[in-house]
Structures are given as C-alpha cells and as structure tokens.
Amino acid sequence: MDRPVSRLCCIGCGRDYPLEEIRYECDACANLLEVVHDLELLKTVRDGPGWRHLFDERLGVRSGIHRSGVWRYHELVLPDLPAAGVVSKPEGNTTLYRAARLEEESGTAEVHIKHEGENPTLSFKDRGMSAGVSFARHLGVGMVACASTGDTSAAMAAYAAQVDGMRGVVVLPKGQISMEQLAQPIASGCLTVALPADFDTCIRLLREVCRRRPLYLLNSVNPVRIEGQKSIAYEIVQQLGWDPPDWIVVPVGNAGNISAIGKGLFDLRALGLIDRVPHLLGAQPEVAAPLARAHREGYKERVRVKAADTVATAIRIGDPVSYDKAVGTVRRSGGAFIAASEQEIMDAKALVDATGVYVCPNSATAVAGFLKARQQGTIGASDKVVIVATAHGCKFSQATIDYHEGRLPGVRPRRANRVIELRVDGAALERLLASDDGSRKDKP
Ligand SMILES: Cc1ncc(COP(=O)(O)O)c(C=O)c1O
Ligand SMILES: [Zn+2]
C-alpha cells in the first residue's frame, strides 16, 4: 500500500499525529494516544472470510515472521512496518486449555484458560514488546526504557537484547517484584534500577525523564505496544474457530492489556472476521481495585487508590495509566470490573494449579474474578468463557510455596499440599504411602 495505513489518534479529542512521531500523549488535551488503522482501506484488501482464510493458512508455517502469534496478523498489527524490521523470538501461539475443573466448580458450560505464561519470557508482555522493540528499531532508537512490576522489564530486556546497539533501562519498585522477575532484566544485560517507591511513583518519574532525554518509553502508554498485545484476542478467536466466547476475563493492573484486547476485538468485528464482541471482565485484587470501585460507583468519576500489598504483585497498581481506555472499551463491550480478596485469589490459583496448568497469582485474580462473577450471575451458566492467564506460575514460586506452607498473612490454605520431611528410612516412606488416600481434599 503506498500511503500509510496507520496513524496515532488521541482518545480524548481525536486529534491525529503521524505514527512515526515519538509521542505518548496529546498536545491538545494530554490524553493517551492509540494507533488507528484505516479500516476502510483494509476492507478493500480482503473481506472478513478472506482475512480469516489468510490467517488460517499461516498456522503451522515453520519460518519467517508469520510463525509468531503476533506477526501472523501483521497486516492488522503494524501494516506499515516492513517484515524485515520485525524483532521476534517468535512469541504467542500459547495454549488454550479447556478448564474442565473450573466448569465443574462453577457450573459453567465452557471455560478455557489462555495461558500467556507460555510466551518466551513467561508472560503476555512479549507480544507487546515484540511490536514495541520492532518499532523502536525501525525509528532508529538507541535506548528503550520502562517502569515495571516485573514482567514488562523482563520482556523489554529480552527483546532489546536481540537488537545490536539497543540499550534497555528498567526502573523497578524495590522489593516489590519476585526474585525470578528481577533476575530476568539483570540476565539480559539491562541497566536495572530499583527505587524505594511503588510502581505508580516509578512510572511518573520515568515519564518525566523521558520528556527530557532521548529515551523511548515502552510502558503500555506506548500505543504501538498495544497493537502487539491485542493479538491475544486474535489468537483466542482463531483457536475457537472464529466463534468468539461470551466473556473474556483479564487480570488488570495498568489496564493496557484489557484495552488492547478490546481494541483488537472491535477491529476484528469492523473488518468482518467476527460478528460480535465478547463482554470483557477485568479483575483486580481488592487492595488495588480502582476500576472495580469505579464500576460499582457507575463510573461517575475517576478513582485512584493507594495500592496495598497483595500476592498479585504485578497488578499492585492504584492509578492505572490506561484507565480511560480501559473504561471505554469495557463499557462498550457490555462488560464489568470485579475485585477478589487475597484468599479468593490464592484458592483459585491452587484450584487451577492442581489441574497441571500452573498460573501466577495475577492470573489467579482473573480466575477468582470469574468464579465470583459466576456466583453473582454476571456470567451465566450457559456462557462460553476464556480466562487469560497472563504469566507463568514459575515466575512466582515464593507465593506458591508460602500458600501451601500456610505462611501468607490473612490467607487460610484450603488447598494446601505441604512438603513432608522424612528420615532417610524406606519403612517410613512405605508407611506414608500406605496412609496416603491419593487425593488432596479441600478444607472447608
Ligand atoms: C502477570 C501480569 N498480569 C497482569 C498484568 C496487568 O496488565 P496491565 O498492566 O496491562 O493491566 C501485568 C502487568 O504488569 C502482569 O505482569
Ligand atoms: Zn487530545
């Protein structure tokens, strides 16, 4: 196509900017920007069935960028970016697990878990970072930066490490991310900075510095990242044979991911790949739930809270950066936001983990949110539901062990599976085996 397909557009006043301009907010009204593709032009390239056929044909290719679960949809992600400029590992192509145990527990017709922890750095952030770092390279940027609750920095570091001459800088809230997450940017060679502050403060500080220094910001305020992120939704509907679920449930922190998933779905509908958009349910921990509160209060005004400690450390955010985008897209989908307690989160995690699908506490917040929404009747018994697990349990080992050992403050481990220490004694092991009834019972 000879003219650009995409531009940046302010979500507040609608002002346009060229895609290649490095900016994260509108000059006129300071709102966030989004990438807008010329859907009318894309409709002239193919109709809905034509696009579906193209993407189905690319399934299973063995080389090139279409192997990636982001770049399979290249024409709808960043159509103006040449294929040669793509930085990919590849990412995506994560499993959609049928969650029979959750169907039984909740009495719901069809429940799936989309396990984004199966990405290269073990979280969904790889999708957005593949887009963000590709675009940074395309722009000739030398230094990329992000503030992070852990997973963003891991992904940015690993993608920046793939580009010759690109330096990554990460700013982290000291002591508030898991050891495994901290190890990732260090291992990938990033400049790794810890501040004695919460995430909300880290991002505010970094955004200020980015105004003065030539740093390319790769937090989810960066609209290009959102374009990569939305491929989660594309994969979900493609894996379901282009028949969308009734609900998609997503754990929410800064709210970039749920905004991306919503944007992707509305674009798919506009292009005729799907005929309806699922309702979106955003789940937050009770101690960091500004959007769930806003939902309860009818979105009358913007809610900011001081986020307290939670097992779901990656979504310990009181002032979500993409608040307006998320509220807009969730309301447009006929969806909701919901909050779950620490007890509910960790019990939900143990329930899913025990099926052999190992998820993190942030992902478990979505599972707990789903169970609650089912109980409240927001989600119905005959609904088809997809829960997005955003990171792998292996990134949050301490929380898992602390739960099973009964060491999490305020949480009773109803599904505890404790380590049993024995003497080096075969007979003792045999006695233990004889007394084991083969099942782990839930405690009331
Ligand atoms: C594992 C995990 N889940 C959920 C989220 C929340 O995503 P978002 O900030 O886009 O709402 C994050 C973000 O840091 C995360 O790392
Ligand atoms: Zn504006």
Image (spheres, grey):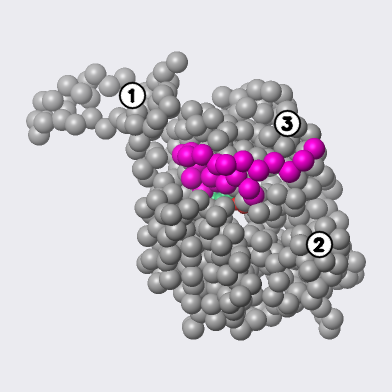
- Label 1 near label 2: C-beta < 8 Å? no
Q: Quadrant of residue 376?
A: top right
Q: Amino acid at mark 2?
A: Cys
Label 2: how many Cα within 10 Å (few below 14, some 14–19, many 20+)? few
The part of the chain drawn in magenta is 300-320
Looking at marks 3 and 2 on the same chain, the residue that comes earlier in the sequence is marked by: 2
Q: Residue at x 34, y 31 (%)?
A: 407
Q: Which mark is residue 296?
A: 3
Location of residue 262 in the rendering, given as x and y in whole percent from the top left corner: 74, 50
State whether label 1 is within 8 Å of ligand 1. Answer: no
| SS for callout 1 | loop
Q: Please state which amino acid type lies under the numbered disc 1.
A: Gly
Residue drawn at (60%, 62%) of the image: 219
Q: Is residue 394 above or below residue 342?
A: below
Tell whether position 310 is magenta.
Answer: yes
Question: For mark 1, what is the residue?
Answer: 438
Residue placed most toward the observer, 444 or 337: 337
The residue tagged 2 is 29
- Look at the numbered disc 3 and give the secondary structure of its residue: helix
Residue 196 in the figure: left or right of residue 97: left
- Mark 3 CB in 8 Å range of ligand 1? no
